[in-house]
Image (cartoon, rainbow, N blue to C red):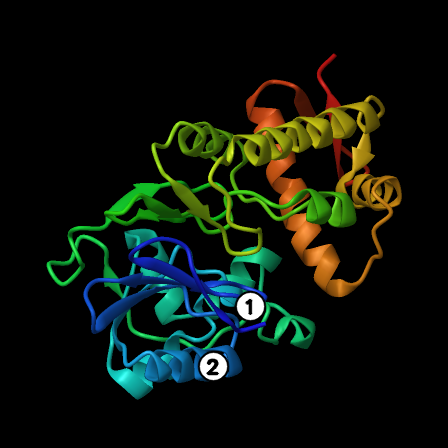
Amino acid sequence: MFELVQVSEQCYFIESPSKVGIYRQNEKDVYLIDSGSDKGSAKRTLRIAKEQDWNIKGIINTHAHADHIGGNAYIQKETGCDIFCSTIDIPFIEHTLINPLHIYGGYFPQDLRHKFFLAESSKAKDISSPDFPNELKTYDISGHSLGMIAIVAPDGTAFVGDIVSSEFILKKYGITYLLDIKKHLMSLDFVEKMNAKHFVMSHVDTVDDIKPLIDLNRKKIFEIADKILELLKEPKSFEALLKELFYHYELSMNFKQHSLVGSTVRSYLSWLKEEGKLQTQIVDNILLWKTTQ
């Protein structure tokens, strides 16, 4: 854990629970792709950079989830480096209270005040800034989050954040976090067609061919959608549906899982309703969901 791994001529990553990618612009200057989950990860990253005699010029965040921006503030404070992200992610990085508010859907209790949901705030710039290294190409691959981006280096290495989950994670957790299901499916299609030599993902082993993983993740989305439609042949409240999904995927309910999985299930419901497959009704002041067939 926390070892430096070279992927290509110019690109590396630091193996950790949430990988820190590295683009080496020249012999001295590097840009980090995400910063890890917390201050401890940031300290290890700085130590590795010092051992390599690298100067950290900036951090490029694939998206603004806490486990990807958790080291931002410490590294920025220690190095004075710039932080870049998509336009929509700037407020999430500069005012990190928005992240748990966003996932929970209201002001959140103490249960969500930990590093998985709430990182320290840092100052960010848009990837359109003239300070951004223009030899790097960025692409919108949102869906997992509002503003997730892919970063492609000149040597053909693509850093694609949380675009896919591993087969192990899909089996273990059943329902992984997604925000906009329709957009995520579009992003899967886009990344599947990307002309890249290597794909570096935050929580999945690096691969040269990402298509099998994309196919696996796409199938899981439609499997979950089909299960929701099956369970909603009879009207159910959101909580009743969530309970049955937890039993089906053998998940253990706790506050964190209720928030994360619950947020994702709401996104599935919105998508399926917009697709004309679900409808809602109010009975005894309870919102019920039901298939349209």
Asked whether residue 105 is in view, the answer is no
In the rendered image, residue 243, in percent from the top left (x then y), is placed at 85, 45
Which sits earlier in the primary sequence, circle 1 or circle 2? 1
Task: Find disc 2 in the rendering and name its residue.
Answer: 44
Please give the name of the residue rendered at 38% of the width and 82% of the height, measured from the top-left corner: 46
What is the secondary structure assignment of the residue under circle 1? Answer: loop
Please give the name of the residue rendered at 53% of the width and 66% of the height, measured from the top-left corner: 15
Q: Considering the image in quadrants, where does the C terminus appear?
A: top right
Instruction: Report the residue that reaches farthest toward the left.
Output: 130
Please give the name of the residue rendered at 50% of the width and 77% of the height, measured from the top-left corner: 41
Residue 116 bears which disc, if any?
none
Count of labels in the image: 2
Please say if the residues under marks 1 and 2 sit with CB atoms less than 8 Å apart: yes
**Residue 164 occupies which quadrant of the picture?**
top right
Task: Find disc 1 in the rendering and name its residue.
Answer: 16
Would residue 194 appear left or right of 222 to someone viewing this image?
left
In the rendered image, residue 267, in percent from the top left (x then y), is placed at 60, 39
Residue density around tag 2, few if under 14, some if 14–19, many if 20 or more, within 10 Å: some
Name the amino acid type tagged 1: Ser
Which residue is more in the foreground, 175 or 15? 15
Name the amino acid type tagged 2: Arg
Asked whether residue 231 is in view, the answer is yes
What is the secondary structure assignment of the residue under circle 2? Answer: helix
Residue density around tag 1, few if under 14, some if 14–19, many if 20 or more, within 10 Å: some
Would residue 2 appear left or right of 130 to someone viewing this image?
right
In the rendered image, residue 237, in percent from the top left (x then y), is placed at 79, 39
